[in-house]
Amino acid sequence: MYEGFRETWAEWGRSLDLKDATSWTQLGQDLWLLLSVQGLPIPLSVLLLACLAGGYISIPLLAATGLNLFLVLIRLALLWAIYPCYHRLEHFSPAALLFWLSPLADPLAVVRIFLSAGQQPTQWRGRVYPANS
């Protein structure tokens, strides 16, 4: 894996996006889907719940809140499903609890993928590629 945050930020985006193997139209659709289901549900849920708590109630607001909370619930269900792969009773540490906070990093991951999708890579994992003009 990567040695630290800086290396992860620099190299990870290249590992995730597949802009070399897809059209710009497909890439745009993929980025829209990623933003919709991974990047926005947690921030929007907080914002929409704050609006509801502030007394703003409408059918579209309730529908949007329900949809985003449902997407957050799916994310938590995925965490629960993969939890046995990461949980080790004999090697428990308080840092292992950070696993449950990983959905909070989803918006940052989406930002990194968006940045990577808009750049032409010139190096990756120590290999240097010629810049295309």
Image (cartoon, rainbow, N blue to C red):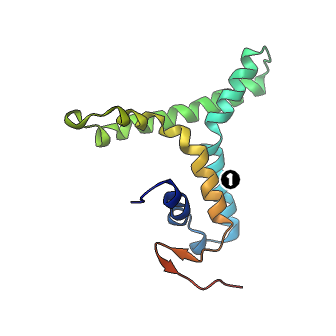
Left or right of 62, for residue 5: left
Q: Nearer the viewer, residue 123 or 26?
A: 123
Q: Which residue is mark 1?
A: 32
Q: Residue at x 46, y 72 (%)?
A: 125
Left or right of 122, for residue 48: right
Where in the figure is residue 42, as x and y percent of width and height? 61, 34
Q: Residue at x 48, y 40 (%)?
A: 102
Left or right of 32, for residue 89: left
Q: What is the quadrant of residue 123 in the picture?
A: bottom right
Total numbered badges shown on the rendered structure: 1
**76 above or below 31?**
above
- Kind of element beneath mark 1: helix
Left or right of 120, for residue 77: left
Where in the figure is residue 83, as x and y percent of width and height? 34, 37
Report the quarter where the C terminus lies.
bottom right
**65 above or below 25?**
above
The amino acid sitting under disc 1 is Trp
Where in the figure is residue 33, as x and y percent of width and height? 64, 51
Q: Residue at x 39, y 60 (%)?
A: 1
**97 above or below 11?**
above
